[in-house]
Image (cartoon, rainbow, N blue to C red):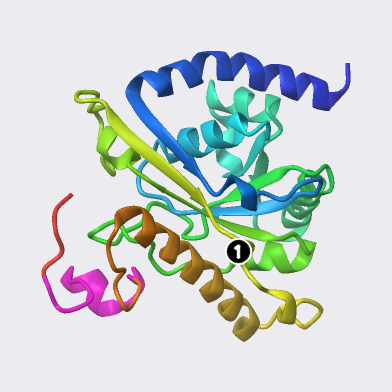
């Protein structure tokens, strides 16, 4: 039995447990499926508001007949229970520097070449924005997109934070919540392909990805996004705990 067949069987077994549980915990509404590429791999950039986001996004893609592959910290592959599951489902370990980085890129490229979906959280972690808007992105997703040439699809989700609040420890199951996932059109990075990957180029590509993603989140929320994305590295925001307009950060 080939590696891909083993991976699909493992996905099927896990999905038979996880998906019914997800359906019990929350209603769902999938939108924008017409924007999913047909017959070739792509990178999906999703917003990140709570620890169960990967289950939501994975549920969505599996429902479309697409096996989701995530970029995950290499250390997670050594965890007692999670590690074997990540390896069995062919998730992509992220190792920085040297041969490890080259191996990560090769693994990501293999997913795309196999017409798969490589899922990345371009913020790099749960949003620190006090109102859960997408914050300033990191350049890793943009770099990978420009290195592989894969199309980038923004994928917004909203509602999972009502089931498990950001940094929460307890599920809020009643009343039953609803989660929505909205897929946008591919981000236009065509003019940035084939040029040196300078900081300026990577920042521009990242900004385009985050702008499209934020617009989709605003559509799901029915609200206007802040004019400026939260930057956890900005001294005033980090030390004073203040938001965009000088307002005190809300407690989640």
Q: Is residue 99 magenta?
A: no
Closest to the observer: 106 or 10? 10
Q: Nearer the viewer, residue 11 or 72?
A: 11
What percent of the width, then of the height, locates residue 221? 31, 55
- The answer to which quarter of the image holds residue 159 is top left
Instruction: Establish if 11 lies above or below 196.
Output: above
How far from the left and from the top, in percent, is residue 50?
35, 43
Q: Residue at x 65, y 18 (%)?
A: 12
Tell me if 83 is positioned left or right of 90 in this view: left
Name the quadrant containing residue 98: bottom right
Q: Secondary structure at mark 1?
A: helix
Among the 4 quarters of the image, the one containing residue 144: bottom right
Asked if 121 appears above or below 111 in the picture, the reply is below
Q: Main secondary structure of the magenta part?
A: loop
Magenta stretch containing residue 239, yes or no? yes
Q: Please rate how many residues cluster around mark 1, counting C-alpha atoms within 10 Å: few if below 14, some from 14 to 19, many from 20.
A: some
Residue position for label 1 = 140
Q: Name the residue furthest front.
A: 34
* Residue occupying the point 24% across, 59% down: 131
Residue at position x 74%, y 24% in the image: 7
On the image, the x and y values in percent for residue 57 come to 51, 39
Q: Residue at x 26, y 38 (%)?
A: 162
Residue projecting furthest to the bottom: 200
The N terminus - image quarter = top right
Q: Is residue 46 above or below residue 187?
A: above
Q: Is residue 160 left or right of residue 88?
A: left
Residue 223 locus on image (x, y percent): 27, 62
* Span of residues in magenta: 230-247
Which residue is at the front of the view, 116 or 137? Answer: 116
Q: In this rendering, is residue 131 above or below 113?
A: below
């Amino acid at each position: 039995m080939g590696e891909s067949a083993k991976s699909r069987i493992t996905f099927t077994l896990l999905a038979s447990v996880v998906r019914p549980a997800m359906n019990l915990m929350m209603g769902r509404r999938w939108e924008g499926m017409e924007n999913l590429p047909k017959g070739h791999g792509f990178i999906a950039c999703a917003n990140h508001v709570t620890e169960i986001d990967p289950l939501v996004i994975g549920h969505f893609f599996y429902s479309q007949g697409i096996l989701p592959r995530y970029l995950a910290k290499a250390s997670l592959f050594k965890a007692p229970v999670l590690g074997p599951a990540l390896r069995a489902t062919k998730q992509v370990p992220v190792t920085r520097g040297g041969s490890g980085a080259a191996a990560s890129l090769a693994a990501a490229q293999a997913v795309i070449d196999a017409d798969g979906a490589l899922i990345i959280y371009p913020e790099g972690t749960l949003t620190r924005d006090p109102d859960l808007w997408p914050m300033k992105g990191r350049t890793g997703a943009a770099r990978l997109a420009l290195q592989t040439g894969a199309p980038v699809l923004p994928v917004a989700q909203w509602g999972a934070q009502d089931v498990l609040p950001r940094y929460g420890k307890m599920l809020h199951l009643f009343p039953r919540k609803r989660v929505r996932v909205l897929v946008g059109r591919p981000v236009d990075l065509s003019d940035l392909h084939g040029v040196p990957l300078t900081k300026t180029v990577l920042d521009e590509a990242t900004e385009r990805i985050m702008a499209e993603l934020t617009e989709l989140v605003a559509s799901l929320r029915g609200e206007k996004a802040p004019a400026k994305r939260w930057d956890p590295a900005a001294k005033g925001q980090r030390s004073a705990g203040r938001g965009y307009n000088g307002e005190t950060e809300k407690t989640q």
